Image (spheres, grey):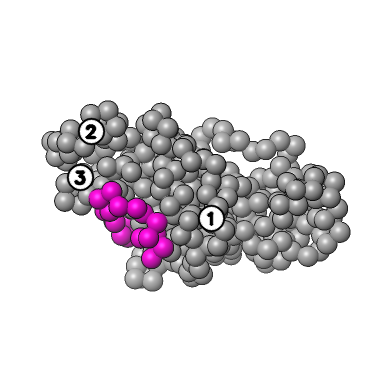
């Protein structure tokens, strides 16, 4: 039975085909387009292996109120049949929309959406198959980067003074606040069914802020918005990778490459959101060459999202 998505109920996520399914991109890069097309066309009935975003998209395929996944690809149209066959094989649903184009999808694909570049680990940590786990950074992700700007410009002491003086003033919303809000609305549907303890969606705030000195404002901001995360982890400047390795999210969103690569090196799929003051200071994009433990191969776009000592 195929269930058509209802836009008013679903969160629309656009994901590139190489993130959803492994397409042997190395063949294209090393041998060229002709060999790549031959390789894809000959075994077109053989499904691609799952990619790093597969389990993020594949959970609850029969639901009409969770995710409407739009698959974007820069592949030649000849590869499309194998993509469709693979989707039918794995997801058993028609809620994935295929669109073929001749140019690479860009981060401005949806002007009303939030976009991120996903870094896939060489070896992905095993993630839950019955619960979707999404982790968010705080500043420049859920919150505007106003406090981070003070830290970058005036240093740690001024940042702490500012947060203490303004702890009862909510931060403005950041680029992923709308996505957390949408996930929260979905969670409420499960809570109403008595499924709070075994809800199939779990969210995390993973921030380099300190709980004692600057975490209060973050929590009060979420409360003022009527939002919450299931867990709030204040790392006080410590690397995020080891903690993410423990909680095993399907994806984590962050604005700094330092944290994105740290997560990917320990097996967590991490999305780099090009937003905020970290990009101006070069910390959002530095080390963009990518370590041996991770690779870049995808653009992820979420429609409906509104457009630390931090290292």
Q: Which residue is mark 2?
A: 155
Residue placed at 70% from the left, 48% from the top?
Answer: 98
Q: Which mark is residue 262?
A: none
Relative image position of residue 255 (x, y in whole percent)? 41, 41
Relative image position of residue 72 (x, y in whole percent)? 66, 45
Q: Which residue is mark 3?
A: 214
Relative image position of residue 139 (x, y in whole percent)? 33, 41
Answer with left or right where residue 235 lies relative to residue 65. left
Q: Quadrant of residue 276?
A: top left
Crowding around mark 1 (Cα neighbors within 10 Å: few <14, some 14 to 19, many 20+) is some
Q: Viewer-proximal residue, 165 or 122?
A: 122
Q: Viewer-proximal residue, 261 or 81?
A: 261
Quadrant (top left/top right/bottom left/bottom right) for the N terminus: bottom right
Q: Which residue is mark 1?
A: 293
Q: Quadrant of residue 301?
A: top right
Describe the element under mark 3 as helix, strand or loop: loop
Crowding around mark 3 (Cα neighbors within 10 Å: few <14, some 14 to 19, many 20+) is many
* Sooner in the amino-acid sequence: mark 2 or mark 1: 2
* Sooner in the amino-acid sequence: mark 3 or mark 1: 3
Q: Is residue 241 one of those drawn in magenta?
A: yes
Measured in 3D between alpha carbons, the distance from the residue under mark 3 to the one under mark 1, in whole angstroms, is: 32 Å
Residue placed at 38% from the left, 42% from the top?
Answer: 141
Q: Quadrant of residue 196?
A: bottom left
Residues in magenta?
A: 229-246
Is there CB contact under 8 Å for labels 2 and 1?
no
- Count of all numbered marks drawn on residues in the image: 3
Q: Is residue 240 one of those drawn in magenta?
A: yes
Q: Is residue 180 visible?
A: no
Relative image position of residue 148 (x, y in whole percent)? 29, 35
Residue placed at 74% from the left, 64% from the top?
Answer: 47
């Amino acid at each position: 039975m195929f269930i058509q998505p209802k836009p008013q109920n679903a969160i629309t996520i656009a994901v590139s085909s190489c993130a959803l399914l492994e397409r042997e991109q190395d063949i294209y890069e090393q041998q060229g387009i002709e060999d790549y097309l031959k390789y894809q066309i000959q075994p077109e009935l053989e499904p691609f292996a799952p990619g790093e975003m597969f389990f993020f998209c594949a959970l609850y395929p029969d639901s009409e109120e969770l995710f409407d996944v739009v698959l974007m690809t820069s592949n030649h149209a000849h590869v499309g049949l194998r993509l469709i066959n693979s989707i039918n094989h794995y997801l058993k649903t028609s809620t994935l929309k295929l669109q073929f184009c001749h140019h690479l999808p860009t981060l401005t694909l949806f002007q009303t959406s939030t976009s991120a570049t996903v870094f896939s680990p060489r070896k992905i940590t095993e993630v839950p198959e019955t619960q979707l786990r999404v982790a968010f950074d705080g500043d420049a992700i859920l919150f505007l980067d106003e406090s981070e700007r003070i830290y970058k410009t005036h240093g740690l002491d001024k940042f702490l003074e500012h947060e203490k003086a303004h702890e009862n003033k909510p931060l403005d919303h950041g680029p992923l606040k709308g996505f957390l809000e949408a996930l929260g609305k979905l969670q409420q549907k499960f809570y109403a069914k008595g499924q709070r303890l075994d809800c199939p969606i779990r969210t995390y705030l993973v921030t380099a802020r300190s709980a004692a000195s600057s975490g209060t404002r973050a929590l009060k901001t979420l409360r003022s918005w009527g939002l919450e995360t299931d867990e709030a982890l204040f790392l006080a400047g410590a690397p995020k990778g080891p903690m993410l390795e423990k909680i095993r999210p399907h994806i984590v969103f962050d604005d700094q490459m330092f944290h994105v690569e740290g997560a990917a090196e320990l097996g967590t799929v991490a999305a780099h959101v090009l937003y905020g003051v970290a990009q101006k200071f070069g910390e959002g994009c530095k080390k963009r060459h990518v370590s041996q433990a991770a690779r870049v191969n995808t653009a992820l776009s979420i429609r409906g999202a509104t457009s630390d000592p931090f290292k």
